[in-house]
Amino acid sequence: MPTCAFIGLGVMGYPMAGYLQNAGNQTTVYNRTISKAEKWVEAYGGSLGATPCEAAQDADVVMLCVGNDDDVRSVVYGESGVLEGMSSGSVLVDHTTASAFLAKELEGACAEKGVGFVDAPISGGQAGAESGQLSVMCGGSQEAFAKIEPIIDVYSKISILVGPSGHGQLTKMVNQVCIGGLLQGLSEALEFAKRSNLDTEKVLEAISQGASASWYLSNRSETMLAGEFDHGFAVDWMRKDFGIVFEEAERIGFNLPVTVMVDGFFAELQEKGHSRSDVSSLIELLTEK
Ligand SMILES: NC(=O)c1ccc[n+]([C@@H]2O[C@H](COP(=O)([O-])OP(=O)(O)OC[C@H]3O[C@@H](n4cnc5c(N)ncnc54)[C@H](OP(=O)(O)O)[C@@H]3O)[C@@H](O)[C@H]2O)c1
């Protein structure tokens, strides 16, 4: 079985690394806050690296799932970074939602060491990570993807090589643009139903199989109506992702009017203390208090 290293045991990385170890891939983990890595080793076995470099030594595949572009750079480069420890023929997989620019930069840095690279952002949220049912959008060479596909299969329901380096990140941007407008529409629809004194349970039953069906409608409507947002995908993360989208949109000279408007609503939510709330808290801006 290929050996693995996993850097970043957050909400997503912790269970993903667990799936690797449980599947028989000897996995070494690194986490900046060491107590999380110790807890992981206690729960799953495997081993612990004192630095990203130490964790990556002897690994056939190294996965990252940290915060943003700068966080990725800080665990990849330098003496304690993963690249220092990786050998020729191994593959670096970045599951962080980051820029397409970074993906191309990493591909170049990896190539200098004979290391393969795949940008592989994920969708499916905490629940998808915990149930091993993530969607993984990949960019890179066919050769690098072929090496990692059977391994990342343990925590994904689908992984697709969309195109060369950066195309995984660009696909994740498409995903986030879809979600922004969709969530605002769902928020307005649910609030409209409430203010029309409809039986919202019956409304959801009636419309959930029709043309307005979506993951958010099926999985978030009830909690949105109940005003529960202490779960899921944080507003802060979405604003980070939209920032990446807007940079890319500017680069290609394309306007995203609805996404820009929804980003403004997310900024309002941050001001109201909803930074760590699920993105479905958009409905809070419409709710009558
Ligand atoms: N949560 C979701 O539903 C979801 C869904 C899809 C995609 N994503 C994306 O997946 C990535 C991770 O999300 P998450 O929810 O797992 O985040 P999280 O729970 O906040 O975890 C982030 C992880 O990255 C580590 N980290 C951050 N900055 C670092 C740095 N400079 N050096 C070393 N380690 C660093 C953190 O270490 P510490 O433990 O020391 O803080 C932690 O292990 C993000 O890019 C996010 O946009 C998240």
Image (tube, rainbow, N blue to C red):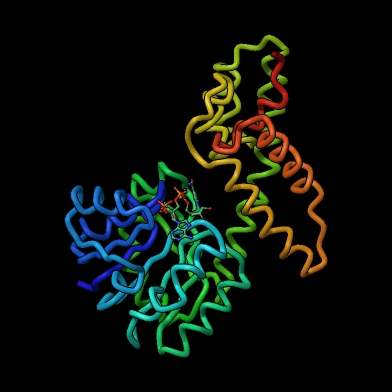
Residue 78 location, quadrant: bottom left
Q: Position of residue 25 (x, y in %)?
A: 22, 66
Identity of the residue furthest to the top in this view: 197
Q: Is residue 10 above or below residue 221?
A: below
Looking at the image, can residue 82 be seen? yes
Q: Position of residue 171 (x, y in %)?
A: 59, 62
Q: Nearer the viewer, residue 146 or 180?
A: 180
State the residue at coordinates (62%, 31%).
273
Looking at the image, can residue 185 be seen? no
Q: Position of residue 82 (x, y in %)?
A: 38, 74
State the residue at coordinates (44%, 68%).
75
Q: Quadrant of the N terminus?
A: bottom left
Q: Quadrant of the C terminus?
A: top right
* Labels in figure, total: 0
State the residue at coordinates (18%, 49%).
42
Q: Position of residue 149 (x, y in %)?
A: 37, 69
Q: Is residue 262 above or below residue 219?
A: below
Q: Is residue 89 left or right of residue 231?
A: left
Q: Is residue 56 left or right of residue 225?
A: left
Q: Is residue 208 left or right of residue 148?
A: right
Q: Is residue 166 above or below residue 216?
A: below
State the residue at coordinates (28%, 69%).
4
